[in-house]
Image: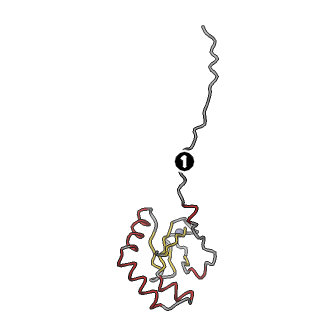
């Protein structure tokens, strides 16, 4: 799974979808070597997962950023956006359980109008 986070710009609210290649994550976190990540990144790129994610983000009007290329983005509004995950220890993690679609029928509220017309 490609690691992609969406950040809104604090200045203007433009949304940025930031892709974090594994090579970068391993390097930043120190949990592995860049070479380890590069193999995984290659496999993901080859499978088309990255392009698909990019197309999806852009379809939503988000601006695509590859954190492997730049860890800092300059927004059109002039604000500097630091997309280095290591500087954001509290990145909201999407809980899969929240995304689970709820099934079931939503009962319509029954509105009962009192039919009390005076016959005339
Ligand atoms: Zn902005």
Query: In the picture, residue 89 is in which quadrant?
Result: bottom right
Give coordinates of residue 96: x percent, y percent: 55, 65
Query: In the picture, residue 114 is in which quadrant?
Result: top right
Q: Residue at x 60, y 73 (%)?
A: 91
Query: In the picture, residue 8 is in which quadrant?
Result: bottom right
Above-or-below relation of 104 to 67: above
Q: Residue at x 57, y 67 (%)?
A: 94
Q: Nearer the viewer, residue 49 or 58?
A: 49
Give coordinates of residue 63: x percent, y percent: 45, 69
Q: Furthest-front residue in view?
A: 104
Element type at mark 1: loop
Identify the image quadrant of the C terminus.
top right
**Mark 1 lies on residue:** 104
Above-or-below relation of 27 to 14: below
Give coordinates of residue 40: x percent, y percent: 43, 83
Q: Furthest-top residue in view?
A: 120
């Amino acid at each position: 799974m490609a690691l992609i986070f969406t950040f809104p710009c604090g200045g203007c609210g433009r949304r940025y979808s930031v892709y974090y290649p594994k090579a970068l994550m391993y390097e930043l976190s120190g949990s592995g070597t860049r070479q380890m990540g590069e193999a995984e990144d290659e496999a993901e790129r080859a499978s088309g997962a990255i392009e698909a994610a990019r197309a999806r983000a852009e379809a939503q009007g988000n601006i695509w950023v590859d954190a492997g290329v730049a860890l800092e983005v300059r927004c059109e509004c002039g604000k500097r956006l630091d997309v280095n995950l290591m500087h954001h220890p509290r990145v909201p993690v999407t809980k899969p359980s929240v995304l689970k679609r709820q099934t079931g029928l939503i009962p319509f509220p029954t509105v009962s109008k009192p039919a009390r017309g005076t016959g005339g």
